[in-house]
Amino acid sequence: MIMAALEFCGDHMVFFKGVEGGRYLQSLWHPAHSSPSEPRTATGIKKGLPCRTATTMRLALLLLVAALFQLALCQRQDPFFWLSALRSRGYTYGSLQADTTGGDCPIECDCPPSFPIAMYCDSRNMQQVPYVPSRMKYLYLQHNEITGIPDGAFDNATGLVWVMMHQNKLSSDKIGKKVFAKLKSLDRLYLHHNELTRVPPICQSPSGICA
């Protein structure tokens, strides 16, 4: 990405050529010269402190804009980019530790001690919903081969808040009519990119009974 800016430093004009390949390039142009000099790194300036300070601030601003642009692009390409960001803070598959909070985590999933209320079962080529421990509030089952959700699948984990089941092979006739009935705290349910033909019944009545 190339950005350009223009600034006066004392009796010199500084022409910023931008950010390229991780380096910040600029040219010094004295008014007496006909064109900017060859690019050199920002550390090559030895003029007064105010000019250097302003140059440093502009460099920081340009780098910040570039970083924000890259982040926005990633989020546009992947609406669940925040999941990757969460894992980058300690929840990556390579750094997940074995479950030490009771031994009830399914062998095909990850239940990190650093985040004991979340169960990561995404991208495991699973074909059915696994057992969900009662302490779980965040369940990640996306990017699998799951075709249905039978009634009672979540009865042991009625405190679930998020259920991520997008990018599976769910069909409407294989989702139980009362499968979500007892999830009174359910706040987010992701079912996009499946083979559904209708919205599954979701009931959060005080009695937990769906008609």
Image (cartoon, helix red, strand yellow):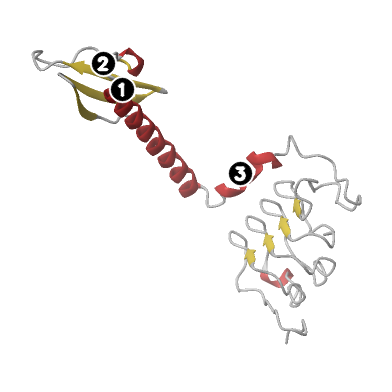
Q: Label 2 sits on what residue type?
A: Lys
Residue drawn at (15%, 18%), measured in percent from left and top? 11
Q: Label 3 sits on what residue type?
A: Ser
Measure the alpha-carbon separation of dots 3 and 1: 38 Å
Q: Label 1 sits on what residue type?
A: Arg
Relative image position of residue 103 (x, y in whole percent): 91, 49
Relative image position of residue 128 (x, y in whole percent): 79, 58
Local SS, label 2: loop
Residue drawn at (36%, 24%), measured in percent from left and top? 20
Labels 3 and 2 touching (C-beta < 8 A): no
**Residue in front for this viewpoint, 9 or 15:** 9
Labels 1 and 2 touching (C-beta < 8 A): yes
**Residue in front for this viewpoint, 144 or 34:** 34
Local SS, label 3: helix
Residue drawn at (24%, 17%), measured in percent from left and top? 27
Measure the alpha-carbon separation of dots 3 and 2: 44 Å
| Residue assigned mark 3 | 84
| Residue assigned mark 1 | 52
Relative to 35, residue 165 above or below: below
Label 3 vs 2, first from the N-terminus: 2
| Residue assigned mark 2 | 47
- Eye-nearest disc, 3 or 1: 1
